[in-house]
């Protein structure tokens, strides 16, 4: 189940063309018959003795991003909104979409959860501390914005961000963003 606003993007991601792409990244690991979720009636789901609330937070690495908040557990499941020690997916981003992502991080921070389960996590990350992860993502977005402004070629952006974040997982996403946003300027 998912918020109705999010389902069209999910349906796109399980279309035959996308499944071919995802199958290249995850050979032999995906089902041949993916199923999109059904629309959630309302915004809450019972979880044991607690209630989970699904909250739409806007554009992050995709449109219609949402999070799940379980106040009784001091928990947020952030999907694509918060990354845990992993390069953030900024390919195709604009100043407006990056500002939207920053607002989404503010919305997550306002929930004051102690634990945050990120949709993208470095397996070597020390913990799932919400405050740390949100702060690191805010810094990354700000540093990316500055590095992008100062770079005229993909390699410059990659070098700047790698120097600032040498230990983050999935540098592929940084490379894709650099070539997407600066490739035509070289």
Image: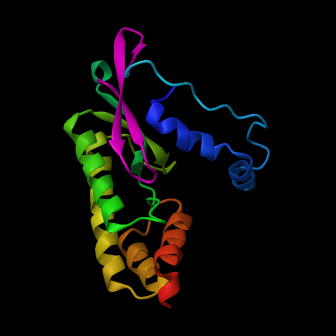
Q: How is the image coloured?
A: rainbow
Dominant SS in magenta: strand
Could you say where residue 28 lies in the image, as x and y percent from the top left? 79, 44
The front one of 180 and 30 is 180
- Residue nearest the viewer, comparing 33 with 144: 33
**Image position of 163 (left or right of 11):** left
What percent of the width, then of the height, locates residue 23? 74, 50
Residue at image coords 73%, 40%: 30
Magenta stretch encompasses residue 146: no
Q: Which residues are magenta?
A: 44-70
Name the spot of residue 11 as percent of width and height, x first. 61, 40
Q: Residue furthest top?
A: 49
Q: Name which quarter of the figure residue 33 lies in.
A: top right
Q: Is residue 63 magenta?
A: yes
From what the image shows, is residue 164 above or below residue 90? Answer: below
Residue 4 visible in this rendered orientation of the protein: yes
Q: Does residue 34 appear left or right of residue 94 in this picture?
A: right
Q: Which residue is drawn at the image coordinates 47% and 81% (left, top)?
A: 182
Q: Quadrant of residue 61?
A: bottom left
62, 76: nearer the viewer: 62
- 174 relative to 78, above or below: below
Evaluate whether residue 117 shows in this view: no
Which residue shows up at 28% across the image and 40% down it? 108
Residue 109 x %, y % = 23, 41
């Amino acid at each position: 189940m998912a918020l109705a606003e999010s389902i069209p993007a999910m349906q796109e991601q399980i279309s035959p063309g996308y499944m071919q792409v995802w199958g290249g990244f995850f050979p032999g690991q995906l089902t041949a018959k993916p199923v999109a979720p059904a629309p959630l009636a309302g915004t809450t789901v019972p979880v044991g003795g607690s209630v989970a609330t699904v909250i739409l937070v806007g554009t992050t690495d995709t449109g219609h991003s949402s999070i799940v908040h379980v106040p009784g557990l001091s928990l947020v499941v952030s999907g694509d909104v918060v990354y845990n020690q992993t390069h953030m997916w900024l390919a195709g981003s604009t100043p407006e979409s990056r500002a939207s992502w920053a607002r989404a991080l503010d919305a997550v921070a306002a929930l004051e959860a102690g634990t945050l389960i990120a949709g993208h996590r470095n397996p070597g990350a020390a913990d799932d501390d919400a405050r740390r992860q949100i702060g690191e993502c805010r810094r990354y977005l700000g540093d990316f914005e500055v590095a992008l402004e100062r770079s005229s070629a993909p390699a410059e952006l990659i070098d700047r961000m790698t120097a600032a974040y040498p230990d983050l997982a999935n540098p592929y996403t940084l490379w894709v963003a650099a070539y997407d946003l600066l490739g035509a300027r070289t």
